[in-house]
Every structure is written in C-alpha cells, then in structure tokens.
Image (tube, rainbow, N blue to C red):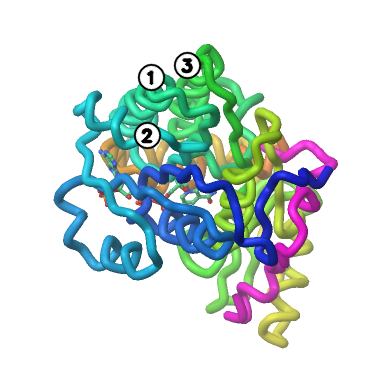
Amino acid sequence: MTPTSAATASDPTSTAAPIVLAGATGALGLLIAHALRQRGATVRALVRPLATTGAEAASLRLQGAEIVAVEYDDAAALIRACEGAACVVSALSGLREVIVEAQSRLLDAAVAAGVPRFIPSDYSADFTRLPEGSNRNFDLRREFARRLDKAPIQATSVLNGMFTDLLKGQAPVILTGPRRVVYWGSPDQPLDFTTMVNTAEYTAAAALDPTTPRYLRVAGEVASIRGLQAAARAATGQEFKLLRAGSLGVLAGLIKVTKTVAPARHEVFPPWQGMQYLHNMLSGQAKLAEPLDNDRYPGIRWTQVREVLAGRD
Ligand SMILES: NC(=O)c1ccc[n+]([C@@H]2O[C@H](COP(=O)([O-])OP(=O)(O)OC[C@H]3O[C@@H](n4cnc5c(N)ncnc54)[C@H](OP(=O)(O)O)[C@@H]3O)[C@@H](O)[C@H]2O)c1
C-alpha cells in the first residue's frame, strides 16, 4: 500500500506539523533527521542540555532542525516540546533508564500534548515472539511496548533486523583476515539485514505517514550464512570458507560463560548481548515475518550486503 498522504522525496511539501525527534544527536538519530529534512519535514530535535553545544547539534542546526534542550525528567518541558507535533520519533539508546523510563516519560508527554503518533526506538530484529531472558535489550523493548500498547496514541515500530553496517566490524561473523564466515546452527537460516541509512530513510517516511500499522518490517537484504559467504566473495573477489563453531546449544553455553566472565552490565551492547542477538537471528526466532513492507514507500534504494562489505554503502 502506498499512502497518498505521506510525503515523498519528490514532494517535499509535507505536513507543516513538526516531527519531534528524540535521540537526534545519536548515530541513527542524525540519519533520521537528515532523511526527514530531505522529505521536507519540519524537525524538532530534543537534545539534552549538555549535548546542545556539540558537533551533532551543530549539524542538526545546519540541516534546518530546531533544537530544543530538554531533560527527560522535566515533564512540563517535555510536554511543551511535543506540542503541535504530528509524530514523536524516538532514536534513544540505552538500558532500562532510557528504553523504559525516559521513553515512558516521552510517551506520557506525547499523549499529554495530544500528539497522534509515536515511533519507539526499536529498529531491530523481531523481538515480539522471543522468550523472556533470551536477549536483555529485547526484554526492555517488549516491556516498553506493553506500556505503549496501553497508551491512547497510534504506535508504529520499525523492525529492520541487524544493521548491515555491523558486518564490517562489530558483528564478528565475516572474518576478512582468515577469510571465514563463522556461524552456529544452520548455514541456511534466512537472516535480515538493513543499513542504518535505509532504516533512517524508511523511518522518516513512516513518521510522515499517518496510516502506518503497529509494526513495519523491512530488510535491505535477507541472506543466509551461505548468502553472506557469497556476498563476501562478490565484495572482495576472494573465497571465504564457512566455519561452523557448533550448534545453537553451544552458542547458548558460550553466552552464559561470557556473561559470567565479562558481565559489563552497564554497557548497552556488551559482547554477550551481541551473541544473544546472533542466537535470536540464527535460531530463526527473531526472523521478520514475510511479506516485508519494503515497498510501502517508493524511492528507497535498498543497499545490499555485498555493497556494504565492498565499502560502497
Ligand atoms: N538493529 C541493529 O543492529 C542496531 C544496532 C545498533 C543500534 N540499534 C538501535 O538504534 C537505536 C539508536 O541507536 P544509536 O546507535 O543511534 O544510539 P547512539 O548513537 O548511542 O545515540 C543515542 C541517543 O540517545 C540519547 N541518550 C543516551 N542516553 C540517554 C539518556 N539517559 N537520556 C536521554 N537520552 C539519552 C543520546 O543523547 P545525547 O546526545 O544527549 O547523549 C543520543 O542522542 C537504538 O534503539 C539502538 O538499540 C540497532
């Protein structure tokens, strides 16, 4: 479905009501702000006072976003910041105090200000069907989702799988040195990947579309481990071998050990949480249900894994 009321890149005359963007100084937030401005949206960026003088805030101002300094424990200021908005988009990142607590205060403010729509900071694999405890960060998202679903506001989550960008570093799956693709379980399990830029472009389009459903599921590419192997070969011109490190049970054991020896509980993405993410994907439990919603907004060119690996993203 292509909603007629959504703004597009060729029609920058979007709604005059601003889109409120929380977490606008973050990596994804900056990209969402850019994509919103490209679509002609008015962007009101909520930034904590300390960050208003940083380079990211300067970049937001240059792009034409309005910067509003807010503390997330100042309910009155949050309500004022949300007034008149068409949608509140969250790109906050953190643990309970951010994903559940700060986002809940933002949600309360959006409702109090009469904002019709809210997009939470989900941007992930499909956490909706995962068992409690299988991924600490996803437990927090489901907890916030339960609050969001009770609130008198239209909610839409963008689910995009893993950021493809992570395959170039943070996610140790494609090892360019020894030319191996490491995995647990089956090499044929389909996995969802979307670049940060594509996720931001899609989120901006969704923010400007008053007809979105509760969940939008997108993937720039659905690739199995064998697909990643082919992408690595296409990107580098070199052969990559598969390296099966064990069953999913072995990975689960490894997660327990890593969590014990390197708990790093205050880090948002400690190594064991990345491993939980991999387990969720490789088990198929966090696979995005198809058909995907990629075609909802025309004009988004979905970047492929091989392009990211080749540095052409
Ligand atoms: N699917 C994936 O593979 C994947 C990978 C990475 C991230 N993500 C998700 O993408 C979203 C954005 O992540 P990101 O990497 O762009 O995050 P980021 O760069 O770390 O940015 C985080 C933003 O949250 C704000 N923030 C942090 N702590 C806060 C607090 N206590 N109170 C209020 N604001 C706070 C920061 O504001 P200040 O500037 O004021 O500090 C910043 O704007 C998150 O939902 C994250 O989990 C998904």
Count the labels in the image. 3
Please provide the residue range marked out in magenta: 286-313
Rendered image quadrant of residue 106: top left
Q: Residue furthest bottom?
A: 237
Q: Residues within 10 Å of mark 1 (few under 14, many from 20)?
A: some
Per the image, label 1 sits on a secondary structure element best described as: helix
Residue beneath the point at 68% across and 47% down: 6
- What's the distance in space between the residues labelled 3 and 2, CA to CA? 19 Å
**Disc sitting over residue 82 in the figure:** 2
Q: Is residue 172 visible?
A: no
Which of the two labelled residues, at mark 2 and mark 1, occupies the earlier sequence position? 2
Question: What's under tag 1, amino acid-wise?
Answer: Ala
Asked if residue 89 lies left or right of residue 190, the reply is left
Which is more toward the observer, 237 or 206?
206
Asked if residue 237 lies left or right of residue 202, the reply is right
Residue under numbered circle 3: 147
Asked whether the residues under the numbered discs 1 and 3 touch, taking CB atoms below 8 Å apart as contact, a structural biologist would say no
Residue under numbered circle 1: 112
